[in-house]
């Protein structure tokens, strides 16, 4: 039970802090973490949490943010927040944070828990806010505690409402037990009558259908991505390394308004393009090579995802032309079936039929696509009918290492009731468009 003693121990409220701590000088706006909610105002995230609590209906739910990645060097690697936590809170700069939701509580229905401050560590990394009114204003949470209060708060809430909702994701038996399930097991062992409810499909279904404000961020990311791919086609030179071309692509992303990379860029020339997730940078571009670039910008944390394949010389050879046309035909066959209510497996089979008829099905070695959003491989259930408002990729390809090439054509689409809207527009895709863009 959450007693006054446990509140004091956790540093749960400014009013309970020892005299002097509450009066410390706060960082000005724009400094200290959490800096606020990103990329939308706190009200947006509060409304999302309300809708989730309405869907849950009762009990409690605990959502863990991502931990800081382990490192043993002098500078920590970049931190990426868990997608569910970011979508519900907008807090992307606080590793180790926790959200508690309690739908049936009369007054306080949501709690934000942040790790304890470490003033000495903050001298090396980033200053963090003390608990108080400023942190409440920035985050939009009326109740902000330290993570040491997790046990007392969750146990007290579970005593009153016996259902513990697991929001996912479901993990493989070889993966670690999710923290929320581990916590729920500990609570169930101490609070008789509690039960764990599988609510793991609720958040993916909510996040899968994008809000207009999310689509706007993705349009901006797609526009920046187009700048990068066009720059690659126009600037590429034989003799360049893959790394030089990658640098040109990513510079154009930034010039086009991109605020980050949606994922690690893939730039493969010749044989390297046949490795699906190639990450090298040292291959040298030769005159007869096909170059595959799978790279995209992000804006406001929202991803784009585009792949283009083009000839280093600016002109496809007859063989390259035939194979590229085959991949494009598979892409178009899948796209023709895309609309709200369609099954993704039907899109996949349409693309595979094109390869089967050409005797090339064994050269298509991966799935047709995935959802896109805050995560480039975003949440959603591809086994269910596609809802209007979802954003997916279509990305068929052929990969033949023995012939020193790989071809993939990937775009992102907003699913609509009438069909689909290509968000990644403006990137040359047909043979004629690519050769025209590369003409010098």
Image (tube, rainbow, N blue to C red):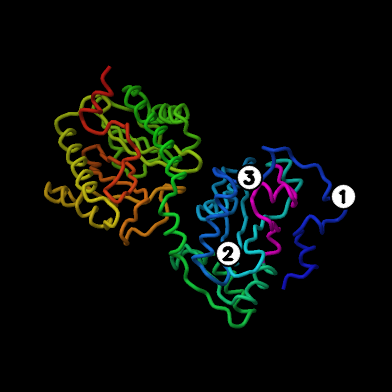
Residue picked out by circle 1: 20
In the picture as drawn, the residue positioned furthest to the top comes out as 440
Let me know if residue 110 is in the magenta part.
no
Residue at image point 75% right, 61% down: 10
Q: Earlier in the sequence, mark 3 or mark 2?
A: 3
Percent across and percent down for residue 24 are: 82, 45
Cβ atoms at labels 3 and 2 below 8 Å apart: no
Q: Is residue 226 above or below residue 105?
A: above
In the displayed structure, does residue 253 sit left or right of residue 162? left
Dot 1: what SS?
loop
Residue picked out by circle 2: 62
In the displayed structure, does residue 439 sit left or right of residue 188? left
Q: Nearer the viewer, residue 219 or 168?
A: 219
Report the mark closest to the observer, 3 or 2: 3
Residue at image point 52% right, 74% down: 196
In the picture as drawn, the residue positioned furthest to the right comes out as 19
Cβ atoms at labels 1 and 2 below 8 Å apart: no
Q: Nearer the viewer, residue 5 or 182?
A: 5
> In this view of the protein, can residue 10 be seen by the observer?
yes
Residue at image point 67% right, 37% down: 30
Counting other residues with Cα less than 10 Å from the Cα at mark 3, is it few (<14), some (14-19), or many (20 or more)?
many
| Residue range (magenta) | 127-150
Percent across and percent down for residue 354 are: 16, 48
Counting other residues with Cα less than 10 Å from the Cα at mark 2, is it few (<14), some (14-19), or many (20 or more)?
many
Let me know if residue 145 is in the magenta part.
yes
Residue picked out by circle 3: 36
Q: Quadrant of the N terminus?
A: bottom right
Q: Earlier in the sequence, mark 1 or mark 2?
A: 1
Measure the alpha-carbon separation of dots 1 and 2: 33 Å
Percent across and percent down for residue 86 are: 54, 51
Measure the alpha-carbon separation of dots 1 and 3: 25 Å
Q: Is residue 169 above or below residue 71?
A: below
């Amino acid at each position: 039970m959450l007693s006054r003693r446990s509140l004091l121990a956790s540093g749960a409220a400014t009013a309970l802090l020892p005299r002097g701590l509450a009066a410390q000088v706060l960082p000005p706006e724009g400094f200290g973490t959490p800096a606020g909610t990103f990329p939308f105002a706190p009200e947006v995230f509060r409304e999302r949490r309300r809708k989730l609590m309405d869907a849950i209906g009762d009990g409690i739910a605990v959502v863990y943010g991502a931990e800081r990645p382990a490192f043993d060097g002098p500078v920590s690697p970049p931190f990426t927040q868990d997608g569910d936590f970011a979508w519900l809170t907008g807090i992307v700069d606080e590793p180790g944070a926790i959200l508690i939701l309690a739908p049936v509580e009369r007054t306080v229905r949501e709690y934000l828990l942040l790790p304890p401050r470490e003033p000495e560590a903050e001298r090396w990394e980033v200053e963090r806010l003390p608990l108080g009114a400023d942190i409440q204003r920035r985050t939009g949470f009326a109740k902000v505690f330290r993570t040491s209060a997790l046990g007392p708060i969750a146990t007290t809430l579970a005593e009153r409402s016996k259902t513990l909702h697991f929001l996912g994701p479901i993990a493989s038996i070889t993966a670690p037990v999710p923290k929320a399930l581990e916590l729920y097991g500990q609570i169930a062992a101490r609070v008789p009558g509690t039960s764990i409810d599988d609510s793991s499909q609720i958040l993916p279904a909510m996040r899968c259908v994008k809000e207009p404000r999310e689509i706007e961020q993705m349009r901006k990311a797609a526009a920046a991505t187009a700048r990068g791919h066009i720059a690659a086609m126009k600037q590429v030179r034989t003799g360049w390394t893959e790394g030089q071309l990658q640098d040109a692509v990513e510079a154009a992303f930034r010039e086009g308004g991109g605020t980050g990379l949606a994922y690690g860029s893939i730039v493969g020339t010749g044989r390297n393009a046949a490795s699906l997730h190639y990450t090298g940078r040292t291959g040298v571009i030769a005159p007869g090579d096909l170059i595959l670039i799978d790279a995209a910008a992000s804006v406001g944390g929202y991803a784009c995802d585009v792949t283009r394949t083009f000839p280093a010389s600016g002109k496809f050879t007859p063989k390259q032309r035939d194979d590229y046309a085959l991949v494009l035909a598979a892409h178009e066959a899948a796209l023709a079936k895309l609309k709200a209510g369609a099954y993704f497996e039907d899109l996949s089979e349409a693309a595979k039929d094109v390869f089967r008829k050409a005797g090339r099905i064994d050269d298509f070695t991966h799935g047709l696509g995935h959802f896109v959003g805050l995560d480039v491989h975003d949440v959603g259930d591809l086994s269910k009918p596609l809802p209007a408002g979802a954003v997916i990729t279509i990305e068929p390809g052929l990969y033949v290492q023995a012939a020193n090439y790989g071809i993939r054509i990937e775009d992102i689409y907003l699913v609509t009731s009438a069909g689909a809207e290509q968000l990644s527009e403006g990137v040359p895709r047909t043979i004629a468009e690519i050769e025209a863009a590369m003409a010098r």
